[in-house]
Amino acid sequence: MRLVWLTGSLAVALLLAVITLQTPRPVGADAPATDFSTARAMVDVREIAQRPHPLGSADHVRVRNYLFERMTALGLGPAPFEGPLSPESIRRAERQGLDPAGVGSSVVNLVGVLPGRDPAAPAVLVMAHYDTVPGSAGAADDSTGVAAVLESVRAIRARGGAERSLVVLFTDAEELGLDGARVFFGGHPLRDRIGAVVNLEARGGGGRAMMFETGPGNAETVALFAGAAGRATGGPASSSLGVFVYEQMPNGTDFTIPRARGIPGVNFAFIGRPEQYHAAASVPDTLDPGSVQHIGSQALETVDALLRAPALPVAGGNAVYSDILGWFVLMHPPATGWLLLLVTAGLGGLAAWRVRRRSVLSPADIGRGALDGLWFLTTAVVLAQAVRLLAGPMTARAASADVYYTLLARLPWMEAATALTVLAVGLLLLAGRDRLDRRGVAAVIGAAAVAALVVGGFSIVIVVMAVLALGLTLVPGLAARTAWGGWLGLITLTFLLGLIVQILAPEAALIFVWPGLLAAAAAAITAFAGPGLDRPAGLAASAVAGVFGGAWLFSMAHFVFLGVGIDLPGAMALIGLLVLMLVRPLAPTAGMVRAVLVAAVVCLLVACGLSAAARWAEPTAVVAPRTADA
């Protein structure tokens, strides 16, 4: 019975996550004039992305002239704004094989204004870049962004005038080093009037569009975005965890420049279909039209909300937030995380008190349950790293920029392989660590660690994880002896991790705090329904938590892996730990242990096969080298 509850809850959670991750249906040309239409935007995409148009090329001039005409037709009164190309960008252009004579020494932005009723009010800037890398027509990066801006301006005009002016900026030379944005914010007469910025980007050719970056002190900005994106086709897609992760990366977009000036704003991008990033395959016919609809609709509603807001957002405190399965955005101040942790501790303590009164449960067994979680986490990180390396080297060991793009193309294979690896370790834990052949498991962990260190290069993280995993495997008596001890131990471990992250990076703590609270509530309900975990009420509480909490975690894991999975596949292990915490009471009975162990071995073997097959499915590609983007 438990196995049915377990597989059922995980299957439904995965199904919900898959549904959540789908792009919305594209809207046709017959849509109301006030709505964003993919069909209308694709007319511009097809015109702009006929061929690659890097700086200095004839097609670069063609695209600029086309955009000048489109901006004129929309009543924006466009004007070129030139500025110097940085010496570093000139050197990058030479490395990309661009003709120095064609590139020249300057960039040409296009700037237009849709006047508002109050010319003294701070203006809203919406921007995208119109240049591409050599060898790619850039249907996604960034022809989609440019086309979405044009379609949004058309829809805003149809909605009627706003108080604020809208400044439209199409930047040049973003692909070389963000020069166009630097030139605008370095000396354009409108730069000091800008009160908020919306930027559109892409890294791939599909997937839901994420709002992945904000300005500093983003609470008011996020609140406005949450309301605006709720009206967008496909709903909102963003989280403070994603924003935090992106801030730790060395990447940059045009939004980097106004953000450094302290201007509030949001940055949108889609990163699915990574094989199209800066590739010849990035053409209009391969672009996901649902992604165009999603990024354009969110941008339109956000820009429109900014234009019509009584006051623009100002920098203040940050927000902790996430979309919930694309339905709505849940947000709270960082300090609320402490209250949620307190409630989690109270519910968990209440469950432990109730169970201890009516059955055998000791603090030591809860501690062993926490060690179970630590064993899972460390083992999954080590195995995931080793399996990932079957698909290719880490980027630090990449021989050329081409290898990075090849690895991006292999990301879907890596994601599936990593997920199966984490699932395999989770099944081993659910089967009961005390039932495993300790020496055999230790041999697998040790071999994986050696392979990861030799092939992937030395990593102190892998060394520490391997030592902990081996110690927890070989030392007997460290596995939880009761189901309640195992469950409450995982909740305790998650609580401690949430406490640490709440102290160090409260905007990212939601990944532990929210699921921990959900699991503690399920534990309290189960404990008061009866101490046994075989009662339907107890199983149902865990299953419901597993469905909705698991769906949220699975959907978040997809975006996290697309962002950092090439070099940090072990990040998936954290998601696995949280899902495991939610469904721990659904662990199969002793009679099903052998079947579960077989399933774990099969998952691990299939994971290895998928990762290795990525080399065959996505051979090394030759693409233009990247310099600066999302």
Image (spheres, rainbow, N blue to C red):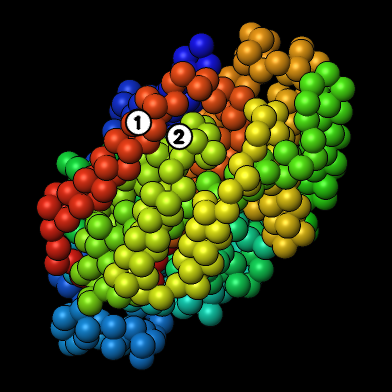
Q: Which residue is depicted at the point 47% across and 14% down?
A: 4
Q: Is residue 590 above or below residue 499?
A: above
Task: Tell me if mark 2 has few (under 14), some (14-19) or many (20+) residues whose alpha carbon lies within 10 angstroms of its own.
Answer: many
Q: Would residue 398 be visible to someone looking at this image?
A: yes
Task: Tell me if mark 1 has few (under 14), some (14-19) or many (20+) residues whose alpha carbon lies within 10 angstroms of its own.
Answer: some
Q: Which residue is mark 2?
A: 427
- The amino acid type of the residue labelled 1 equals Ala
Count up the numbered dots: 2
Q: Disc number at residue 354? A: none
| Circle 1 SS class | helix
| Circle 2 SS class | helix
Q: Earlier in the sequence, mark 1 or mark 2?
A: 2
Q: In which quadrant of the rendered view does residue 344 lie? A: top right
Q: Which residue is mark 1?
A: 599
**Residue 35, image x and y in percent?**
45, 30
Q: Which residue is depicted at the point 73% across and 57% down?
A: 500
Q: Which residue is depicted at the point 58% across and 48% down?
A: 476
**Residue 58, image x and y in percent?**
15, 70
Label 1 and label 2: CA atoms lie apart by 8 Å
Most foreground residue, 106 or 330: 330
Q: Is residue 165 above or below residue 606?
A: below
Most foreground residue, 133 or 375: 375
Give the left or right position of residue 383, taking residue 379 as reference. Answer: left
